[in-house]
Amino acid sequence: MDAPRPRVGPGVWRFRYVRPEPDGPERLAPITVAGMLIPLAVALLLWAAWRREVFPYKIEMLWLLTPKEWWYPGTTAPVDWHGSAARSLFDSAFLVGIVCAAGFLGSWGKISRHYLGRYNPTVRALLAGAMALVALVFVWPEAFGLDWDPLPLASAVLSAVALLTGGFEAFSSPVLVYTLYALITALVVWPFARVGDWKGLWRARRAVQNPPAPVPTGPEAPPSQWPELREAGEYRAADRLVAEVAGGRMNDVDVARVRRAWDGTARDGVGRAALVGALLGEGGGAAAHPSGDRDLPIRVAEHDLFLGQVRVGRYAAADRAPAAYVGAGLALDPALLGTSLLAVGPSGAGKTRALVAPVVESLTLQALTGGCAVVAVGEAGAPLGPDAAYDVVIRLGDPASPHDLDLYAGATDPDEAAVLFAEGLVGDLEGLETRRAATVLAQLIGPYRAAYGRFPTVPVLRELLEAGPGTLQTLLDLLPQDQGQSATAMRRELESRIRQTGTAGDPGPVLADRLATLDRPVFAEFFGGGADAGDGRGFSLRAVARHPIRVRISLPEGAHEEASRLLNRLILAQFQAVTRDRDRQGAGSGAGRGHFACLVLDDAAGALTQGTVRALQRLRPQNAGVVLALRTLAEVPEALRGPLLAVVGCRMAFSGIPTWDGRAFADAWGTERFETTEVAHHTVFADQPMTRFVHFLRKKVTGKAVTTEAVTVREVERERWSASDLAHAVPPGHAVLSLTDVRGEHTPPLLVDLRPAGRG
């Protein structure tokens, strides 16, 4: 609970994150060292010229800025002490000016910090003090027993005071003299104190000698002491939870669940009072998930439920990776999944093992904390966790399945039910609009529900689509005879359907043919009449938008591949519809959009249509997202590949994808600008005989022709990852991943290691 979790970029495993240290000390470029020495040499030359009276216009500046009576006519020889003081002041000003200019041009401060930064603060301060002592030797040589001439710094300050006061009588006061000496010494030492960070070292020593008193409550208290409860005055409840954690009676799921429940009652006084009572009575078992589970039967991945993260790999040490990501763990959380994730890789690349399974496990754990609802869809043998890890398990095609899937998603409006069903039936079919198919279905299921009180099952609906006018006339006779608006509308819908039956443009046979994939003996006990069936087995995805529920849907295998694709489309369309209506549902049920809802399709082949791709961008504001795994982008219609990559926030290309898939990812990731240096060697052709002879001898000795270098530096654009690199340069067990969270923060495409060894 108290482990550090520093804030870093999106997608980084924050638990005990430590920024990687550079491989070695940074080396200064030779041009930087030369840039330090050249200004120093120039400064020494200028100072020598000034001292030897050969500096241009030195005499003219003295005459211009001082009274003429201070000098003998035509010279700079001082008449009295005024001239001597002025010369000392001018020498000091010139010295300070050239030293400051040389230090600025030579980057002396940067170079000093570079070398001193390698040491700990104490050694750095001592080295800076030694340099300050050397500088003081040149300012006060007589204080160290030396007889050379001092630098004109102290004499300049004393001369300035004498000129301001009109003589040297002021120096008869020891207080003034020693104050000036201390000021001069402080001015000399001050630059070295900054470089050595003496102030920081002093503060650190004071903090060690006088540590702040620990505060048992407040935001600075460790999370393990439950400061949020103590701030609210609930000390007994906080102490109870501390004891529960210390005694091992609370796990990370319990802690995350209690914290979420506490935050959720911030504006509900009655609910908070009830929660406090439950904490005092049940401890870590308070506010439990409706299933009563407090953990999963088995865990495979590494989780941090305090942040909702699951660790799925490690960022590889590549040239394109930012420093904060090199060697760091790769983690996914609801803030990233809320922008939806698309993973593409061939069979055997590790999509299910390395990505889908850890993500599903994390979402099921977060569901136990009340923060998430998950629907995991995959084949019966997909390793998405045991059935005991879910609240609802639907094994389509298995007679022993405890639940059935509601094809109408709990809808009570025939039009809404028809739209959802039509998207699954013909959403991928060219030449038949989903809107037209929904109209035909609504013309049948609406009157059927009005006549029988429930929506039709799959065999019944297929029969109605294939039926002739006589059969439909029988259904028309069963409709209520009252003249209400609803009955009139149903009659009008069915009569319109009777007129269309058998015509050349009738979509009924096409819909019946598609529906035949679900009207098989293996599905005889499935796909009842929806919410009105009353058999108790039907499960509607609408519950996902209202409750933090865990759902596992197993699709049929073998000869029912087309049925699996149809069900994928239907489930995705239903999920998008129920999450889009969360505001309206929350207004009626009080549920709202408090928890994150996620749909995971382990094999999204055939699931994506024009309507579902368009609806993906509307999931983010609804606190929902989807995870789509594909073997290749060829499983998506060509017209939808670009929009799909544009609408998802997280894109993942596994090792082994074909070049044409790599081209789609390369176009989605775009280009970057960088500087390139080109060095061209040109042979030197001499005109003079002597020069040609020298070049001949040099070529004989070195074996190389005499050349000159032409260096060209320019800024160019290149692809972040080319199609060829994605297809051939990604090692096995790796992938290239780009992330975007719901706040808009994003990462460039980075190489990640997804092998089990890369997760540790």
Image (tube, rainbow, N blue to C red):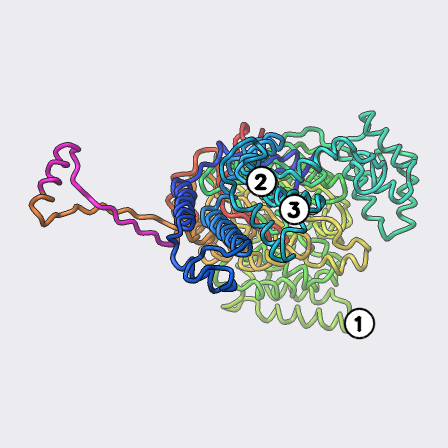
Determine the CA span between mark 2 and mark 3.
20 Å
Determine the CA span between mark 3 and mark 1.
110 Å
Q: Earlier in the sequence, mark 1 or mark 2?
A: 2
Say which residue appears at 77% left-offset and 45% top-offset. Answer: 536
Instruction: Name the residue furthest top.
Output: 247
Residue in front for this viewpoint, 173 or 110: 173
> How dense is the environment of label 1, judged by Cα within 10 Å: few (below 14), some, or many (20 and up)?
few
For badge 2, the amino acid type reads Phe
> How dense is the environment of label 2, judged by Cα within 10 Å: few (below 14), some, or many (20 and up)?
many
- On the rendered image, what quadrant is the N terminus found in? top right
Provide the secondary structure element on which disc 3 rests: helix
Q: Is residue 9 above or below residue 250?
A: below
For badge 1, the amino acid type reads Asp
Disc 1: which residue: 482
Provide the secondary structure element on which disc 1 rests: loop
- Span highlighted in magenta in the image: 693-716
Residue 192 image label = 2
Q: Position of residue 697 (x, y in %)?
A: 11, 36
Q: Position of residue 172 (x, y in %)?
A: 69, 46
Nearer the camera: disc 3 or disc 1: 3
Disc 3: which residue: 180
